[in-house]
Amino acid sequence: MAVRLPIFATCTRGTEPFLAQELETLGCKRIRQDRGGVRFMAALDEILRVCLHSRIAMRVLYPLGEFQSVGAEGLYEAALQVPWEDWLTPKMTFAVEATLKDSEHTHTGFVALKLKDAIVDRLRQKYGSRPDVDSHDPTVSVVAHLAKTTLSLSLDLCGEPLFKRGYRIKTTIAPLKETLAAALLMAANYTGEEPLADPMCGSGTLVIEGAWMAMRRAPGLKRRFALENWPEFAVKAKPLLEDLRREAVAQQRTLPFQLIARDYNEDALQAVKRNVVAAGLSTAVKIEEADVLKSGPPEGPPGLLITNPPYGERIGDGGQKGMKSFFHMLGKSLGRWEGWRMAVLAGNPAFESAFGRRPNKRTDLWNGPIECQLLQYPVVVPRE
């Protein structure tokens, strides 16, 4: 029987239920939601499947332990207890990333430095030499979280965060992270079996993520994972990953419909064009120049309209009054999308009342530091 390891996958606040649901479909066990992530047990092949297929996880962490740490010396002594030689050799590179919550320490860089010193000293005692620090592209990323006096140490199995899919060549103002976009689609029950349109697409993240879901494209298919270079995992992980990548390619499909990405802003249109090409979706996504307040629905059968309305950067200087006016006009315009169901990420508390439609479902989420709601609306029917 395969040995299951304790793993913690991080995610955007509010998306934990959707990540837990995703992890269950990927074969993970003993799934437990936590704030900002989900804990679970998984065998190596299941861990690799999560790294390759998860659309919502930001990072996949292997916890090394929790320690009580007081003062600078406490940080050093705690890290010195970890058998870093199981994961690092002097020929490898590493980096330490620290986060703090209600800690006596106020500078993450100081905490990271004390932990780094302990790692280096332990490996020097073990091997007579030490690995180098590489903050840009380390072989091993150590993740530390200090909450009051509790220090949690983990290894990042993926390396670069999973939201970095590789297709975002050009961005616009306040783009959605890819992992949040995928969570919004899952929250809206998008399965890839119906058309999808974003009439205010910005750099195109929602449409690109929707297209990859519809074509069953694994978001991690083209990337390398940090654990592929670790002595502890590499021998077993590499052949398993080769099999999983072949399996992922075989499950892809050609879409029977095009997804629609619309915007009227020239910078946004240039961004979405470049990103769609980088994502390999030139034929799957149709890009249209259109003003959401003046245009009707696209031709063809209806499906899901999903969008993230601007927070003010592109609608002038009318302040909150101008925002309410825009939201009201947006509600009237989208009311012409007969047969389409709608999901709107609202980051302005004035949106719902100004939009003029009653949602049938709402989901609380965070877009970075901004508290938002995904408001879902039933199929649009014409108003008399």
Image (cartoon, rainbow, N blue to C red):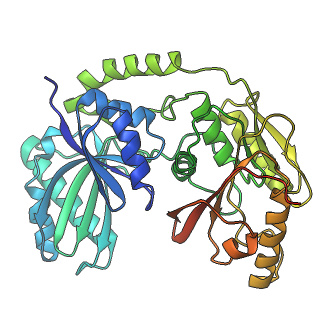
Q: Is residue 2 above or below residue 50?
A: above
Which residue is found at the position 85% from the left and 59% from the top?
Answer: 383
Q: Is residue 207 above or below residue 44?
A: below
- Which quadrant of the rendered structure holds the N terminus? top left
x 86%, y 43%: residue: 288
Q: Residue at x 16, y 25 (%)?
A: 2
Q: Quadrant of residue 129?
A: top left
207 or 187, nearer to the observer: 187
- Quadrant of the image occupied by residue 303: top right
Tell me where residue 97 sits by quadrant: bottom left
Please indicate whether residue 307 sits to the left or right of residue 264 in the image.
left
Q: Give x and y (percent) for residue 357.
A: 72, 66
Q: Which of the pair 277/253 is nearer the observer? A: 253
Horizontal and vertical percent position of residue 93 = 30, 44
Q: Is residue 149 visible?
A: yes
**How far across and how far down the image is residue 356, in percent?**
75, 70
In this view, the residue farthest toward the front is 384
On-image quarter of the C terminus: bottom right
Left or right, residue 55 beside residue 253? left
Q: Kindly identify the residue that appears in the image at 77 percent across and 39 percent down.
A: 302
x and y percentages locating residue 12 in the rendered image: 45, 58
Q: Is residue 273 left or right of residue 82?
A: right
